[in-house]
Amino acid sequence: AAFYPTIFPSIVAMLAARSAMRRAGLRAYSSGATEKIAMVGSGNFGSALTRILGANALRHPVFDNEVKMYVHEEMIDGKKLTEIINENNENVKYLKGAKFTPNVVASPDIADAVSGATMVCFCLPHQFLKPLMPKIKESVAPGAKVLSAIKGIDFDDKGIVLISDLLRQGLNADCSVLMGANVANEMASDAFCETTIGYKDAANGELFRLAFDAPSFKVGTVQDTVGVELCGALKNIVAIGAGFSDGLGYGGNTKAAIIRIGLKEMVKFCKTFYSGIEDDTFLESCGVADLITTCFGGRNRKCAEAYAKHGKTKSLEEIEAELLGGQKLQGTLTAKEVNHILKMKGLEHEFPFFTAVYKISYEDAPLSAITETPY
C-alpha cells in the first residue's frame, strides 16, 4: 500500500517543485552565458538523443549552435563512420534513415569531442566509460555539468556503484540522469514519447530539460537521480524475462504477470539498497512506462525471445552478434551484476525473479524456471 501515493497532494507537490526548478534554471542562464553541449556515445539511443540536442541547440539562444558527438570510429564500406555522419548528417550504422541537423559534428577523438563543453551527455555501454574519463576531465570546461543516459549499474567489493556516481567522482561534476520509455527508432521518426530527468541541482536539471524537451519528446523532471537511474537499469532484467516468455510461446496473461512481479522486485531492490527514493518516480516515464515498452519492444526482449526459441542452444553472445548489429545487450549483464550484489548480501532468495533470469542466462536453469519459480 505504501507504494501507491495519495495522488492529489503528490501532484501538487510535484508541480510546485518543477515550477521552482524552472525558476532556478532561468536565473542560472539569464546571465547570457552560452552552454556548449557534447554527447559521448553514438549508438542507436545516443544518436536519437543527439538529433534532439542538435535541433534544440539551434532553437534556444542559451546553447552554442555546434553539438559535438564522440563516435568510436568504424569503417563502413571502406569509409570512416565519422566522415559519413559529417557529410550525410546521418548515422548509417546505428540510426539509418534519421537525419541530424547540420550543426551536429561527429569526432573520433574524445578530447576534441568534449573540448570546452559545459554540458556533457553520456550514452554508451558503461563498461567503456572508465577509460575515457581522464581525457574528458582534462578537456571539458571548468564547472561542466553532466548527464547520464546509460542504462546499467556497476559494482565493487562494497556493493552497488551507480554510473552517475562514477561520473560525479571521476569528473568532479554534478550529474543528472535521463531514463524513459524511449525506443530509439520510434524517436527517430518523431513519434510522441516522454522521458524523465532526475536531478540533484535544480538549475542544471532545468538546463538539461531545455536541451532535450521537444514537441515529440516531452521531458518530466524529478529530484531523485537514484530512483530514475535504478529504474533504467533494472527494467532490462524484467525485459529479459518477458522475452523468455515470448520465446516459449506464452501469452499476454503470462507477460502481464512477469511485468508485475518484475516491477515489485524493482521497487524492493531500490528500497533495500537506497533510502530517499520517491514512490512517484516509479510512476514516471522512467518507471512503469519504460518497463512496459521495454517488455514489448527493444533489444533485450528481442534477444531473450530468440534465446528461448533456440532452446538455449545458441549463446547470448551469438544472438547479440546476429541481431544487434554491433549494439550491446544490457539486460543480461545487469542481471549478472545484480546477482553478484545479491549473493554478496545473502539476498538471492529475496529476489526470486531476478535470480531466475540470471540462472537461465548464465547457469543451467531451464527456461521454464521463468514461470515455475515460486514468486
Image (tube, helix red, strand yellow):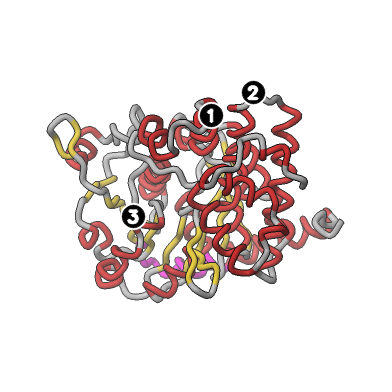
Q: CA distance from mark 1 to mark 3?
A: 37 Å
Q: Which residues are magenta?
A: 24-35
Nearest to the eye among marks 1 and 3: give it: 1
Tag shown at residue 311: 1
- The residue sitting at 16% across, 39% down in the picture is 80
The crowding category of the residue bearing disc 3, from other C-alpha atoms within 10 Å (few below 14, some 14 to 19, many at least 20), is: many
Q: Which residue is mark 3?
A: 40
Q: Percent x, y for residue 337?
A: 52, 58
- The residue sitting at 42% across, 70% down in the picture is 31
Say if 217 sits above or below 336 in the image: above
Q: CA distance from mark 2 to mark 1?
A: 12 Å
Nearer to the camera, 203 or 278:
278
Q: Secondary structure at mark 1?
A: loop
What type is the residue that disc 1 sits on? Gly
- The residue sitting at 37% across, 70% down in the picture is 144
Q: Percent x, y for residue 98?
A: 36, 31
Residue 99 in view in this figure: yes
Q: Secondary structure at mark 2?
A: loop
What type is the residue that disc 3 sits on? Val
The crowding category of the residue bearing disc 2, from other C-alpha atoms within 10 Å (few below 14, some 14 to 19, many at least 20), is: few
Q: Which residue is mark 2?
A: 249
Mark 1 vs 3, N-terminal side: 3
Mark 2 vs 1, N-terminal side: 2
Looking at the image, residue 225 sits to the left or right of residue 170; the answer is: right
Looking at the image, residue 78 sits to the left or right of residue 8; the answer is: left
Image quarter hosting the N terminus: bottom right
Proximity of marks 2 and 1: CB atoms separated by less than 8 Å: no
The crowding category of the residue bearing disc 1, from other C-alpha atoms within 10 Å (few below 14, some 14 to 19, many at least 20), is: some
